[in-house]
Amino acid sequence: MGKVIADQSMSLDGFSTGPNVAVGNGMGDGGEQLHEWMGWEDGGPAARAGVGDELTPFDLLKRSGAVVVGRRMFELGEEPWGEDPPFHMPVFVVTHRPKAPIVKEGGTTYTFVTGGIAAALARAKEAAGGKDVAVPGGADVIRQFAEAGLLDELRLHLVHVLLGDGTRLFGRIDPQRVTLERTGVIDAPGVTHFRFRVRANG
């Protein structure tokens, strides 16, 4: 049975985006620094950071059968992801506003689910067919999954930069409801990679 896995890059001061997030500035001011370790600009893996491709979000997508994202992440990402998005699998968007599915090239279909995170995950697990389900964000969706006990693993890439402001990955999380158990750590130039088992408390 596949796992439900969240993957996020975060600055040393706890932000998963910079300030002033908006359409056209999806990572906020300075937030692109959080992805530089992956080599986005040349389409390559994380070789520049001294780690293998198995640590990147690209690998998580390769092993997953479906994706769950929040509506805000979808709105910020739809344009830059383009007509052939990187997912190549069903993507379920958690939202309060109904919308018809959007079919893109390469096997990506955005399906909008209004029943909350549990309903979106149920749809994703069915579509994944036993493979992992990836939860790339945003931060609030990851928090909801963790607090509800729906997240098996968090892959956290702690990037050695300070952003000063932006979206806090753990800004609204209830620490009494979630325990993170570290299962792996790899230090690399400019970034430290953590894997955590996620356990909900009650």
Image: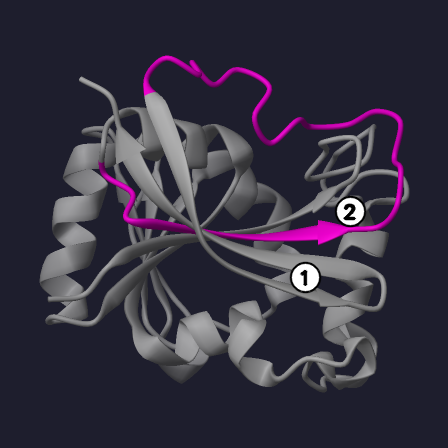
Residue 97 in view, yes or no? no
**Residue picked out by circle 1:** 80
Q: For the N terminus, give its image quadrant.
A: bottom left
**Residue picked out by circle 2:** 24
96 lies left or right of 165: left
SS for dot 1: helix
Amino acid on which disc 2 is placed = Gly
* Cβ atoms at labels 1 and 2 below 8 Å apart: no
* Quarter of image, res 144: top left
Residue extent of the magenta highlight: 150-177
In the rendered image, residue 151 lying in the magenta stretch gets the answer yes
- Looking at the image, is 125 positioned above or below residue 164? below
191 lies left or right of 118: right
From the viewer's side, name the closer residue of 158 and 60. 158
- Looking at the image, is 60 positioned above or below residue 105? above
Q: For the C terminus, give its image quadrant.
A: top left
* Quarter of image, res 131: bottom left
Pinpoint residue 97: horizontal percent, then vertical percent.
34, 28
Q: CA distance from mark 1 to mark 2?
A: 8 Å
Residue 19 in view, yes or no? yes
Pinpoint residue 4: horizontal percent, then vertical percent.
28, 54
From the viewer's side, name the closer residue of 59 and 68. 59
Pinpoint residue 49: horizontal percent, then vertical percent.
79, 75
Amino acid on which disc 1 is placed = Pro
Question: In the rendered structure, which disc, 1 or 2, sits on the residue that comes first in sequence?
Answer: 2
At horizontal 66% and vertical 26% (from top left) the residue drawn is: 168
